[in-house]
Amino acid sequence: MESEDDAILRLRSRAIPTMPTFPDLKSSLDGELSPGKGQQSSEDNHITSNGRIEVEHVISKKLQLKKKAEYLKSDLMRQFDTQVNDFMDSLIEESTSLEPAPVPAVFSPPMSDKERSKLRHFRPPHGEGKLFVSRRSLLDELFEVNHIRTIYHMFIALLILFILSTLVVDFIDEGRLVLEFDLLVYAFGQFPLVVCTWICMFLSVLFIPYTLFYLWAQSHSGSHSHLRLYSLLFGTLFLLYQALGLGFLPTYTVVTNSFPPASCFIIILEQVRLMMKAHSFVRENVPRVLAWCKEKNGPGPVVPQVSQYLYFLFAPTLIYRDKYPRNPVIRWGYVVSKLLQVLGCLFYAYYVFVRLCIPQFRSISLQLFDLRAMVLCVFNSILPGVLVLFLGFFAFLHCWLNAFAEMLRFADRMFYKDWWNSTSFANYYRTWNVVVHDWLYYYVYRDFLWISQKRCRPAAMLFVFTVSAVVHEYILAICFGFFYPVLFCLFMCFGMMFNFILHDKRKGPIWNIIMWTSLFLGQGVIICLYSQEWYAQRYCPLKEPSFFELLKPRSWSCERPDDRL
């Protein structure tokens, strides 16, 4: 007769529940838990001569099962998260083409006319287009996680070290603390003239495009003949204003007054922004007037109010709508914090250039063009290039746009997506700057397809890359004062190539590593080549330059030392 302890142990050994099997554990578990041999196997393998269970064996099996379950759980959650994100993105895009319809009372009460009208304001005025919804910026959500916020604290600590190193070196060299931000003072020089130029640009964009569109719409509301002639007239005037009033005059002002780089960037970037906004306003409202002329479903064509157009000029978006989703209140503390972060990023970039760029390029630019020196320059420029990339992204796309969005109660804060998780350059281009990408997608890519009747998708993509590359190179050429098409070549050659090689079908961590490696290397090339050319233009000025000499990079032949910045 068995003792009581042995009986309890035997019952416990038989009470092990049947678990799902896995390929690598199937044979061992089948041997343990098979109905016919369960008792004998349990007696032979789990009970020793003294009647005790081999606890270590059971625990090891349970641990293996637990690891398998955890792996399956993480893999399942990862796939589920990816599918949900893709589904929500496609749902938002597809919902733009759906008209609001009554919802059965089984699920929710039907929308009122007021709610239906409010929803219609956030939809494109005519046809398909971007749908604005209320949502926060991604970094605002991520910074609520302590682990992500620690990375932000690490960048602040790095800024403190930059400041301390600069102060210590200046104290050793000068014997005193040097707090003269001469580089910032130089970069933002002639600021009063910058403000006056911006005011003239803004007032012209406020009145001229709106007036031309209003007069054109009124010409279509009456019984005028020769409507095509009116359209040709006002369209020509609008294009002339875009080319001369916004295109030529600000550039002429910048070049003739020799604006320093930062001041020049303010004017040229605002010039491009206002041109894109004026185009969006006309592009979104012209189809509404043409649709009214065709259907005559009202007393007159719908012309936006001046206040709506004025709000759009300040709103952090390049896609026009009569109304946008709005937040109920303004959080002024949030606005102040974002503006202070912009200021902090400005000083951060100052210390990056002072500590990492200027000492290096002052010495390198005194040497003749050499392959070895060029390779070392590119790799030494990766760190400052990456820091400038991060600072530009955080200062403008996150802090600056969120500050203006908060002041305007603009609720759609998706100015960027998780571009850092991209495994392809195609996804990176779509998620890095959503504001500009939306404009290029709806007004360049899709309009090109509409004109070509959707027969030339590769040509449409090539046209988008060309427009983007030309505009980027134009901005750098005007602001730096020389033509050196490094960025244009990177866009049109490597950018196009990576867009097709590293496409959306590339998944997995290795492709994200390749994307980051290429991005880091590209930033090093940009910082190195443009910095070398900047100093070469000052070390080796041309007395009577020809057109060919203006196009030839000065850094390829310059080796004359100078003491100027």
Image (spheres, helix red, strand yellow):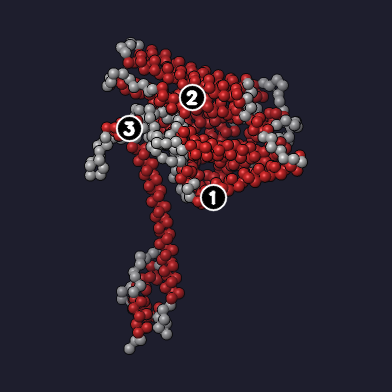
Crowd band around label 2 with a 10 angstrom C-alpha radius: few (<14), some (14–19), many (20+): some
Q: Residues within 10 Å of mark 3 (few under 14, many from 20)?
A: some
Q: Quadrant of the N terminus?
A: bottom left
Q: Which mark is residue 118?
A: 3
Label 2 belongs to which residue?
275
Question: Is residue 237 shown above or below 94?
Answer: above
What residue appears at the point 40 percent right and 71 percent down from the top-left corner?
28
Q: Is 464 left or right of 292, judged from the image as shown?
A: right
Give the x, y percent position of residue 216. 38, 16
Distance of label 2 from label 1 (alpha carbons): 40 Å
The Cα atoms of the two marked residues, 2 and 3, are separated by 29 Å
Amino acid carrying label 1: it is Thr
Q: Alpha-carbon neighbours of circle 1 within 10 Å: few (<14), some, or many (≥20)?
A: few
**Quadrant assignment for the C terminus:** top right
Identify the residue at image location x=35%, y=23%.
287
Residue 463: % across, % down: 47, 30
Q: Residue most toward the top?
A: 225
Q: Earlier in the sequence, mark 2 or mark 3?
A: 3
- Residue located farthest toward the bottom when viewing the structure as drawn: 1
Residue 516 position, x and y percent, is 54, 45
Residue at 42% over, 17% down: 211
